[in-house]
Amino acid sequence: MTLPQLRPTFLALEPDTPVTVRVTSARLEDRETRDPATGIVSLKQALALEITEVNGQPLATSLSFLSAKAINALRPHIDSGEITRRRLQVTRRGRGYATEYEFRLL
């Protein structure tokens, strides 16, 4: 099985391709983002996941989400600790502002 394409320290998800990861920690952090259309910079909350395994292969990397919908979908699993006890399958759907994520604990 091939691993998804990697950026320097973040895992890049290919559209419609499920990726299974092992999460060791999750944290909320503030990030500055720039709107590509207007150039306006704003501060947004991001969820950063530290990853030690991708599709069954050891790999130290990170996965982050700026989407409030994605953050809210994962929050109960973070609060309960399930996200670090089980593997997480993530599938990215759509692109740009229409991007959505599907999550499944395995």
Image: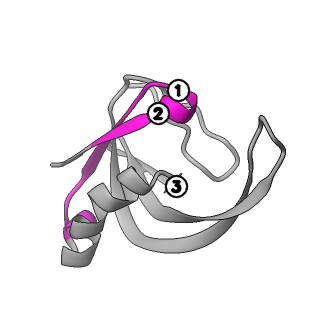
70 displayed left or right of 97: left
Q: Which residues are magenta?
A: 82-102
Rendered-image quadrant of the N terminus = top left
Residue 11, position as x, y percentages in the image = 54, 44
In the depicted structure, whether residue 93 falls above or below residue 55: above
Please state the horizontal and vertical placement of residue 60, each as a whole percent of the image.
52, 57
Instruction: Check disc 1 and report its element: helix, strand or loop.
Output: loop
Q: Quadrant of residue 16?
A: top left
The three-letter code of the residue at mark 3 reads Ser
Specify the quadrant of the image occupied by residue 45: bottom right
User: Mark 3 = which residue?
Assistant: 64
Q: Is residue 88 magenta?
A: yes
State the residue in front, 47 or 35: 35
Q: Which residue is mark 2?
A: 99
Q: Amino acid at mark 2?
A: Thr
Residue sitting at x 48%, y 30%:
98
Instruction: Tell me if residue 101 comes above or below residue 17 in the rendering.
Output: below
Task: Verify CB contact (< 8 Å) between mark 3 and mark 2.
Answer: no
Q: Secondary structure at mark 3?
A: strand
Image x and y of residue 40, in percent: 81, 51
Q: Residue 95: which numbered mark, if any?
A: 1
Q: Furthest residue to the left?
A: 106
Above or below, 96 relative to 26: above
